[in-house]
Image (spheres, rainbow, N blue to C red):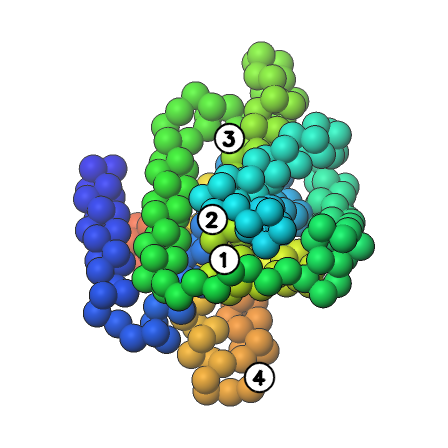
Amino acid sequence: MKKQVIIAAAGLIALAAVPWFSGDAIIHFGINALLVATLAQGWNIIGGFTGYPSFGNSVFYGLGTYGTAIAMAQFHLPFPVGLAFGAVLGVLCAFVFGIPILRLRGPYFAIATLGLSAVMGAIAANVEIAGRNIGLILPLFRGDKMFYELSLALLAVATGTIYWLSRSRFGAGLVAIREDEDAAQVMGINTTLYKVLALALAALFSAIAGGIHAYWITFVDPSSAFEGLLNVKMVIMTLFGGPGTIFGPVIGSFLLSAVFEVLAKVSSAASLFYGFVIVLAVIFMPRGLLDVIEGVRRSGLHYFAANMRRYRL
């Protein structure tokens, strides 16, 4: 574990130096990749550790986006206050809606969270203070390096939180819920409280990421803030890297973001190739890239055959 921490620290320093030695295109790609990685880490808390496949985390991202935008565009408040307002909005939503929907399990929970995303988008499109369908324009600020470092700091805090979860009693409780929720209840774990707190923690990081992105692009509207594809990206990148791991979602996010960026420049059918890569990944490494690395190290190429037999592929 100490070796992983040292590698992570070295990687953090290297990433922090990127905007000072790179052009605008690399910085813009970096901001997007860092924010998506943060969203993936947020999903990792509720989906990877707790075992509840949420398709509603874009709600918290959207609320963070709109909270920041409303505070800055409508009330002319500074960015830190707007960011805090958006974060509070996302966490409150997690508590208010988490208590009823987290009583559902499996596909019923997934459908409920997906419906929540659509409802929030419709509300934002019809509320005057949110700019209705037109959206809101934030004050213009040219500071890509600041946004990059802010996004990196947020990802570092999110990853540090995942590290804490992997070693804490609270994290062990979430894993127990994932493995067998009924057994966890018998053991005395307050599963409802644990699940709501996990959702609130995921909401916090998602909302802050949304607020940073809102001020960076200086414009928000319902379709972009509550984009359904964003939920899919979180899930795919986490599953690709390794759900329930510390660095898996980060690695998955960086790799898939880079693959998509390269394919988008090579071909107009980038999404098709992107989907093909994902299908192959799900077939040959259903537990993520980090599990593949460890499995190949132990068993060589026999790992893939064993995987296909184990999951009946």
Q: The disc labelled 4 sits on which kind of residue?
A: Ala
Asked whether, in this view, residue 92 is left or right of residue 207, the answer is right
On residue 79, the disc is 2
The disc label shown at residue 269, or none: 4
Mark 2 in CB contact with mark 1 (< 8 angstroms): yes
| N-term mark: 3 or 1 | 3
| Amino acid type at image mark 2 | Phe
Marked residue nearer the N-terminal end (4 or 2): 2
Numbered disc in front, either 1 or 4: 1
Rendered residue at 65%/30% (across/down): 95
Q: What is the secondary structure assignment of the residue under circle 3?
A: helix
Q: To which residue does mark 3 refer?
A: 175
Q: Residues within 10 Å of mark 3 (few under 14, many from 20)?
A: many
| Callout in the foreground (3, 1) | 1
Element assignment for label 2: helix
Of residue 299 and residue 10, the one placed in the foreground of this image is 10
Determine which of the numbered discs, if any, sits on residue 215 in the image: 1
Find out whether the residues at labels 3 and 1 contact each other: C-beta distance under 8 Å. no
Which of pointers 1 and 4 lies earlier in the amino acid sequence?
Answer: 1
Q: Nearer the viewer, mark 4 or mark 2?
A: 2
Q: Is residue 60 above or below residue 271?
A: above
Q: Residues within 10 Å of mark 4 (few under 14, many from 20)?
A: few
Residue beneath the point at 32% across and 62% down: 145
Q: Amino acid at mark 3?
A: Val
Q: Is 309 located above or below residue 171 in the figure?
A: below
